[in-house]
Image (cartoon, rainbow, N blue to C red):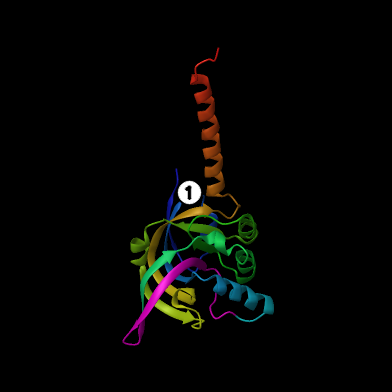
Amino acid sequence: MNKVHELSLPFKSEQIAQLEIGDLVYLTGEIIVTVGLPTHKRIKEFIDAGKPLPMDFADGMLCQVGCYVEEQNGVKVSRYINPSTSTRFEPYLPTIIRETGIKAVGGKGGVGPETIKAMQENGCVYLSFIGGASALTSEAVHEVLDVAWEDFIIQFRLTRLRVEKLGPLNVGVDIHGNCLYTNLKKQAQDKFEDLMEELNRSRPSQY
């Protein structure tokens, strides 16, 4: 039976190690979000050039999540967060995982094979946001802590948020490289083959 975990950030390695694909997770602490392809590209460029990033990713979580921030009386406020498809960021995620020390990536759907390999090598997991639940997950955002790279549009900027019980998030990839989406695809293929055999058996004989 899949388990439910309430975890705090920054992560401890033993917290991440206990997660299995299909488990549900609720997070409390600080996360970094951006939905920008140019932002991920810049992160990789900073890493490749040995330049310090404006935020510390170590033992934290990077989410492919758009965040709309407004300023009220000098205070930045998050209006909503909305996840994006993580496979779009495949050219950048393996380097980010290997070089920043992040322990979790979050987004919608799954991730590609190179990202899964980097996760397995570096004790990182993939946590999938539930589609269509933006209103629920947005309520978990309690504070905008920092915004960097303000030359980008709002949703592309690096934004650090404080969240409380953000979730439910689904463990899509664990630290061993097990992938929920690969398993589901195989199950679907197996069921399709069984269905075709059943249809063939029930088809009237041709004379």
In the picture as drawn, the residue positioned furthest to the top comes out as 207
To which quarter of the image does residue 193 belong? Answer: top right
What SS does tag 1 mark? Answer: loop
| Residue at 50% across, 29% down | 195
Q: Give the percent coordinates (x, y) of residue 24.
A: 43, 53
Q: Quadrant of residue 71?
A: bottom left
Q: Position of residue 12 (x, y in %)?
A: 53, 64
- According to the image, label 1 marks what residue? 22
Classify residue 145 by image quadrant. Answer: bottom left
* Residue 87 screen position, x and y as percent: 56, 59
Return the residue nearer the eye: 43 or 2. 43
- Residue 59 painted magenta: yes
Residue drawn at the location 52% of the way across and 68% of the way down:
62
In the current view of this chain or complex, which residue is farthest to the front?
207
Left or right: where does residue 186 sit relative to residue 9?
right
**Span shown in magenta:** 53-76
* Amino acid residing under circle 1: Gly
Residue at position x 42%, y 71% from top? 67
Is residue 67 magenta-colored? yes
Which quadrant of the figure contains the C terminus? top right
Is residue 14 something one can see in this rendering?
Answer: no
The tally of labels here is: 1
Extreme residue in the left direction: 73
